[in-house]
Amino acid sequence: MPTAPRICPLCEATCGLTLTVDGTRVTGARGDRDDVFSRGFICPKGASFGEVDADPDRLRTPLVRKDGVLQEATWEEAFALVARRLPPLVAEHGPNAVGVVLGNPNVHTMAGALYPPVLLGALRTRNLFTASTLDQMPKHVSSGLLFGDPFAIPVPDLDRTAHLLMIGANPLESNGSLCTAPDFPGRLKALRGRGGTLTVVDPRRTRTARLADRHVAVRPGTDALLLAALAQVLFAEDLTDLGALAGQVEGVEEVGTALAGFTPEAVAAACDVDAGTIRAMARELAAAPTAAVYGRIGGSAVAYGTLTNWLVDVLNVLTGNLDRPGGALFPLSATAPAPRPAGPGKGFALGRWTSRVSGHPEVKGELPMAALAEEIDTPGEGRVRALVSIAANPVLSAPDGDRLDRALASLDFMVCVDPYVNETSRHADVVLPPPPPAQSAHFDFALNGLAVHNQVRFSPPAVPLEAGRMDECEIHARLILAVGQGMDGAAPDAVDAMVIERTLAKAVTEPHSPVHGRDPQEYAAGLTGRTGAERRLDLMLRLGPYGLTLDELRARPHGIDLGPLTSRLPGLLKTRSGRVELLPAPIAGDLPRLRRALDERPGDRLVLVGRRHLRSNNSWLHNITALRGGSNTCTLHIHPDDAARLGLADGALARVRGEGGELEAPVEVTDTVRRGVVSLPHGWGHDRPGTRTAVAVTGPGVNVNQLLDGTRLDPLSGNAVLNGFPVELAPSA
Ligand SMILES: Nc1nc2c(c(=O)[nH]1)N[C@H]1C(S)=C(S)[C@@H](COP(=O)(O)OP(=O)(O)OC[C@H]3O[C@@H](n4cnc5c(=O)[nH]c(N)nc54)[C@H](O)[C@@H]3O)O[C@H]1N2
Ligand SMILES: Nc1nc2c(c(=O)[nH]1)N[C@H]1C(S)=C(S)[C@@H](COP(=O)(O)OP(=O)(O)OC[C@H]3O[C@@H](n4cnc5c(=O)[nH]c(N)nc54)[C@H](O)[C@@H]3O)O[C@H]1N2
Ligand code: SF4
Ligand SMILES: [Mo]
């Protein structure tokens, strides 16, 4: 049977797969042993690529609402309806009347990387909501403030570090995040194997925690206190050593002063971690020949998310580990802009405008996803009346899905780019379905910039596009043409030609550009690629730091190794000072809130945290039979002591109440979760009417985010607090 290489789009690890194919059908998937990065690794999700690809519930044609019902339609009808409905709404109510929602899979498609910025340029709306404010926005804010660039995200140098301090991440289930590393488990084992050490901070004894030398079962939401105390010990015991960073960082002493009150003794009770352990952790971090501090969802989607993410890099700086091999380094992807000469930049501004209803500050041009419902259902000037939603299911992934569900039903118009009719897209007037992944080309624009090793790979479509299907890049381009002004009748490639023209017009004027002084039209004519999207990729590669071309990538189907991560300071800094600004004003302004947390104690109150399962992926893989069952279920984890105190038996139903609502979930008594904490996974609750996911509705689970009302946010980033919020529990009647 013929085979085809394909990068897996199902998580951030970006493993290379070898698909066996039969016509347009994928009959099998195995790890590609020749892949320069993943070297044969595969997980159960990747192994189910064929089932994911062939899911019979994937839409084959666009749907258009007729007589209140979503019905099959032609592409022409679907885009014509968008063109007829959206522009008049904008003309009447202004650009902010159209909201845009961008979900997680956009980071896993070429279309999702290349077209949303163009769409937003055409719509000129300030109502942009993305999965970032349910996820990593605190990291963007921290990086924006520290380095002047919200996308300058250091990743732990997994393969060379001697000590890894991991905060609120569980890569044995998630396979890693903001740290692209195929076979993360193997890389952690290799760290231990070469004599390195791993500390995991997590209120649950996860599979990752079980691999660790030290597991610290912190009280949820208190990591900022814990990390502040680690920094305090470094200052107090004279253990700071900036190494090569000295002279490139300002504000070090000021951080020492600001954190002086966060002694291990002062934070111990709030974190429920004894002061001796905290001191030992700080000394280990300082003593390690190289070390990296790394945090993810458990340190991000929390009340002090930005402070936690800031402290992660403060610790990397104070121990001299930022930007050095074995520490936390900035990757350099093949499509990144070629490095500029070092010097001061424009810095990073927060809150250039605020949301209409609650006055949330914008961050990176985005408003909090948790505020989407109120922007739709609160009457008044500037209300969101129509929505373009691409690869998102916020009814399940964002707080208070019931309110959002009602809000979506009230919209004047909604268009979704999504392969399924699910909890969110069931409200659409038009659904534009992308083809299954095997029929799409693949390139990791974003994830290569977060990878623990510099490399580049391109997958052409593994199988031909089925008749009647439309490539997702073309869907996005046609959507832009349908909503944009003045491009009526243009072919979709015109969108790409326009982007190429603009990019080159600027690049030819830049002295450090490889195309400086060239004729833009002549250069554009020489780009290769089957499609406009591929020609854009070709251009980005050529303008990038390695001067590659798409043809070179095509000639190396298992990828090109671009070498280990290297130091990138001071060139990548874009702060106004041209240095790392260790104590930015917005951070200093949020520290009093953290000081108040020193005195907070939950008492008997339970708090809830999330969890992920290796065979899940947020809300949309529950329709794949091969990935269901076993331990991949929506149960409430609770410690035996808490279960006994509350009269909850294993397997019984518990009633869980939170600020946003109530639900009932089966109890799973387990001492892997610490006392005072319960855990429910997210992405479940597939029991709403009108969806077309036949497997997901059997055993739908419950929507944990219904326990939230959308008001708990990290104030600096607008990120939703999805971990460490209070709940009340009782046996179900
Ligand atoms: N309680 C709690 N809630 C959470 C989290 C948590 O830890 N706890 N995690 C949060 C995080 S980190 C994230 S990223 C969000 C994710 O939340 P969302 O961004 O809403 O992502 P998904 O739930 O994965 O939904 C993805 C949608 O994209 C569609 N899709 C799949 N493949 C494609 C494709 O190739 N193209 C297109 N156009 N669409 C596609 C799916 O059908 C689905 O409708 O959830 C957040 N919600
Ligand atoms: N199999 C699978 N893989 C995935 C996904 C998936 O849904 N399934 N989703 C993908 C996405 S969108 C993302 S963003 C990544 C996320 O990647 P990770 O962050 O590695 O994912 P989680 O498994 O949610 O790990 C978060 C951990 O934080 C812990 N935690 C909760 N609250 C706290 C706290 O207050 N403090 C500390 N220290 N820990 C806490 C939880 O117990 C949990 O073990 O995973 C990606 N990969
Ligand atoms: S680890 Fe992620 S990228 Fe690799 S096979 Fe599994 S789902 Fe795919
Ligand atoms: Mo995420």
Image (tube, helix red, strand yellow):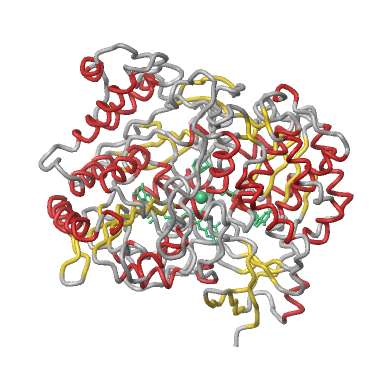
Q: Is 5 rendered above or below residue 360?
A: above
What residue appears at the point 36 percent right and 18 percent down from the top-left corner? 549
Closer to the camera in the image, 215 or 6: 215
Q: Is 644 rendered above or below residue 389?
A: below
Q: Is 482 rendered above or below residue 558?
A: below
Closer to the camera in the image, 225 or 611: 225
Q: Residue furthest top?
A: 517
What residue appears at the point 78 percent right and 41 percent down from the top-left corner? 256
Q: Residue 581: x and y, percent?
A: 63, 35
Q: Residue 332: x and y, percent?
A: 52, 25
Closer to the camera in the image, 545 or 24: 545
Q: Residue 708: x and y, percent?
A: 54, 69
Left/right placement of residue 315 relative to residue 627 reads right
Left/right placement of residue 409 relative to residue 143 reads left
What residue appears at the point 27 percent right and 39 percent down from the top-left corner? 23
Q: Is 284 rendered above or below residue 306?
A: above
The quarter of the rendered structure image containing the C terminus is bottom right
**Residue 343 position by quadrant:** top right
Closer to the camera in the image, 280 or 310: 310
